[in-house]
Image (spheres, rainbow, N blue to C red):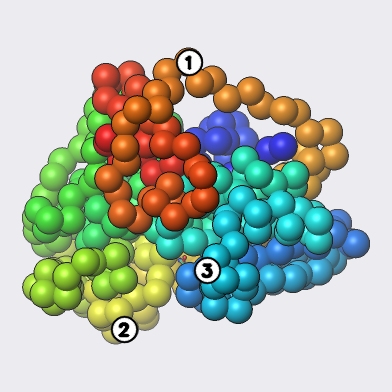
């Protein structure tokens, strides 16, 4: 059964095809109004969301389908201790496709292994957020007219920013991409992105502490929120929370055709006065998310008609290394084996959360 857990689950050709479908939906919405008639989407949101959950629901409704689900863990039987795998098996009885957001890294992967319907990762802890990346790709394509030959600045919380991780994985597969990584030292990218993606693929990148210094060279600026909910100690969050604020003055340093993206929600890292700048694309980006989720639902439901059982290679898996990430799904899921895989860089990483073990 085809699911979307990591953006790497889809080839570049498939990403380009989703973008084409989304553009066709924008141009011809009437052609899609009943494409998911009699189909149900389940939205399982164990963590708060405005855009992802409601754009998924709007997407399914605009395709003529229906929606069931919950928006907080406390209203599901997870609050009574039900496992992710059991929840996924149950929802497979009630829906045709499900989207899961969970604070535990690797939870959608565990769900996909147990489910008999397609599973979509709608954000797992500080790990991945592939459908935000779909929104980002369509936005860059529409704003810049291309997905190649771009210098992309990523600013803010690059450590816990799951949207940043998925976006780097996606954009690294297009030609001529260069990244400028703008963050405090404490919030630099995790190793599974620098080693497994940037270093492995020889993608050029520059580490930078100053937004002002980075701005003049950028084609795309991707701002992110410093995420209070991911910090173990409030003191560090308080010290870092105002590290970068994009305002009208700083926008004067940027190219005239640069576009500003932000997955949202923002706190104060983009002044509201920037919203009037035509280069501010973040509200258009949120709308693009709905179109890409429509395209994604169509693709996964189509493929579910003729499911192919993908064999997972486990030759490089070991079971004697313990994951130490307290936010990994393996810390709470009943009888989930501790499993790690050896990467091409010679590092063992947890199969659920990808942290080094
Ligand atoms: N961008 C994003 O994931 O927003 P929500 O948390 O509101 O879904």
Label located before the other in sequence (1 or 2): 2
Q: In this view, does 52 lie above or below 334?
A: below
Mark 1 or 2: the one toward you: 1
Q: Find residue 294 and report its horizontal and vertical position in percent.
A: 69, 57
Q: Is mark 3 on a helix, strand or loop?
A: loop
Q: Nearer the viewer, residue 227 or 83?
A: 83
- Which quarter of the image is occupied by the C terminus? top left
Q: Mark 3 points at which residue?
A: 46
Q: Mark 2 points at which residue?
A: 272
Q: Which residue is drawn at 27% across and 21% down?
A: 345
For the residues marked 1 and 3, what is the alpha-carbon distance in whole angstroms? 33 Å
Label tally? 3
Q: Find residue 217 and report its horizontal and vertical position in percent.
A: 19, 49
Q: Is mark 1 in CB contact (under 8 Å) with mark 2?
A: no
Residue 314 placement, left or right of 149: right
Q: Nearer the viewer, residue 204 or 306?
A: 306
Q: Which of 320 and 229 is in front in this view?
A: 320
Mark 2 or 3: the one toward you: 3
Q: Mark 1 points at which residue?
A: 315
């Amino acid at each position: 059964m085809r699911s979307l857990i990591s953006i790497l689950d889809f080839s570049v050709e498939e990403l380009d095809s989703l973008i084409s479908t989304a553009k066709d939906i924008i141009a011809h919405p009437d052609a899609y109004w009943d494409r998911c008639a009699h189909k149900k989407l389940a939205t399982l949101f164990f963590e708060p969301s405005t855009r992802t959950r409601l754009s998924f629901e709007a997407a399914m409704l605009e395709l003529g389908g229906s929606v069931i689900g919950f928006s907080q863990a406390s209203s599901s039987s997870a609050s009574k201790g039900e496992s992710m795998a059991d929840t996924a098996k149950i929802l497979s009885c009630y829906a045709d496709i499900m989207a899961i957001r969970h604070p535990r890294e690797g939870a959608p992967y565990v769900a996909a292994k147990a489910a008999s319907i397609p599973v979509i990762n709608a954000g797992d802890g500080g790990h991945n957020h592939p459908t935000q990346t779909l929104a980002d790709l369509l936005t860059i394509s529409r704003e810049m007219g291309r997905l190649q030959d771009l210098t992309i600045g990523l600013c803010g919380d690059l450590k816990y920013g799951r949207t940043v991780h998925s976006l780097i994985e996606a954009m690294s597969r297009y030609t001529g991409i260069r990244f400028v990584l703008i963050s405090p030292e404490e919030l630099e990218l995790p190793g599974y992105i620098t080693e497994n993606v940037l270093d492995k693929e020889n993608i050029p990148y520059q580490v930078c502490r100053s937004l002002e210094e980075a701005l003049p060279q950028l084609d795309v600026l991707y701002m992110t929120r410093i995420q209070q909910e991911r910090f173990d100690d409030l003191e560090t969050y308080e010290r870092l929370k105002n590290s970068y604020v994009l305002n009208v003055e700083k926008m004067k340093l940027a190219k005239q055709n640069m576009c500003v993206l932000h997955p949202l929600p923002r706190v104060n890292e983009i002044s509201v006065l920037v919203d009037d700048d035509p280069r501010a694309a973040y509200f258009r980006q949120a709308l693009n998310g709905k179109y890409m989720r429509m395209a994604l639902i169509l693709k996964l439901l189509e493929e579910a008609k003729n499911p192919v059982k993908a064999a997972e290679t486990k030759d490089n898996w070991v079971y004697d290394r313990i994951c130490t990430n307290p936010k990994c799904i393996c810390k709470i899921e009943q009888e989930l084996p501790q499993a790690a895989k050896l990467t091409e860089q010679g590092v063992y990483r947890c199969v659920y959360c990808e942290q080094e073990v």
